[in-house]
Image (cartoon, rainbow, N blue to C red):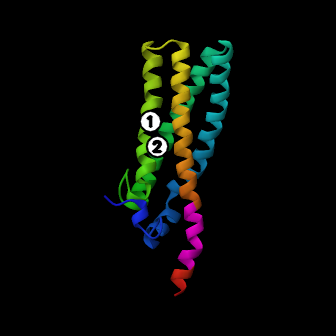
Amino acid sequence: MATSTDRPFLYSEAERRRRDASPWTLVQGVLAPLQFAVFLVSLALVSRTLATGEGVALANASVVAKTLALYAIMVTGSLWEKAVFGRYLFAPAFYWEDVVSMLVLALHTAYLVALATGALATTGLMLLALSAYATYLVNAGQFLLKLRAARLQAPAYAMGAAR
């Protein structure tokens, strides 16, 4: 299996052009900080509920909102990956980010299931949300590192194209 380390650049020249031309690139650029803002508010509400026992309904609503934002970014991210790399998920350049994204999705979805079925009490729900959020932070870090790598490689593309 190819990984992103097997490639000299994160994007081939054709992939870079498709990335730059794709409307999904802008959508991802808008949704990612929006999701992070929802995450920060929800993290505060979940933490408050764990600390005081108050605001349970608001904390639950915030985790649902965070999960819906996650679903939106995952669906549009898959469309972006298809437009740029020709596959919806697990393109070699983003393989490990997609693997961790699946865990993030699973934890957020488990929260929704537990909330809907009453499988966990409030403390269990809030701890599950924090687990989902910790995994989300790891995944967000992965994507930020990829964004940085793409920016660092941009001058190398320009130099290579000039040769």
Q: Quadrant of residue 113?
A: top left
Which numbered disc flags the more N-terminal residue, 2 or 1?
2
Q: Residue furthest bottom?
A: 163
Quadrant of the snapshot with the N terminus: bottom left
Crowding at dot 2, Cα within 10 Å, few <14 / some 14-19 / many 20+, comes out as some
Up-down relation of residue 132 to residue 46 (above or below): below
Mark 2, secondary structure of its residue: helix
Instruction: State the residue at coordinates (37%, 52%).
Output: 90
Q: What is the x, y in percent for residue 2? A: 34, 61
Looking at the image, residue 28 sits to the left or right of residue 3; the answer is: right
| Residue 89, placed above or below residue 109 | below
Q: Amino acid at mark 1?
A: Leu
Secondary structure mainly formed by the magenta segment: helix
Q: Quadrant of residue 44?
A: top right
Residue beneath the point at 56% across and 55% down? 145
Q: Nearer the viewer, residue 79 or 121?
A: 121
Q: Position of residue 76 (x, y in %)?
A: 47, 47
Q: Is residue 150 left or right of residue 44?
A: left
Q: Which residue is mark 2?
A: 74
- Identity, as a three-letter code, of the amino acid under mark 2: Met
- Contact (Cβ within 8 Å) of mark 2 with mark 1: yes
Label 1, residues with CA under 10 Å away: few <14, some 14-19, many ≥20: some
Q: Is residue 163 magenta?
A: no
Q: Which residues are magenta?
A: 149-158
Establish if 107 lies above or below 54: below
Residue 160 in the image: state x and y as whole percent: 52, 81
Secondary element under disc 1, as helix, strand or loop, is helix
Residue in the foreground of this view, choosing between 70 and 99:
99
For the point 51% across and 12% down, the residue is: 121
- Residue beneath the point at 61% across and 15% down: 56
Q: Kindly identify which numbered label has been placed on residue 105.
A: 1
Cα separation, mark 2 vs mark 1, equals 9 Å
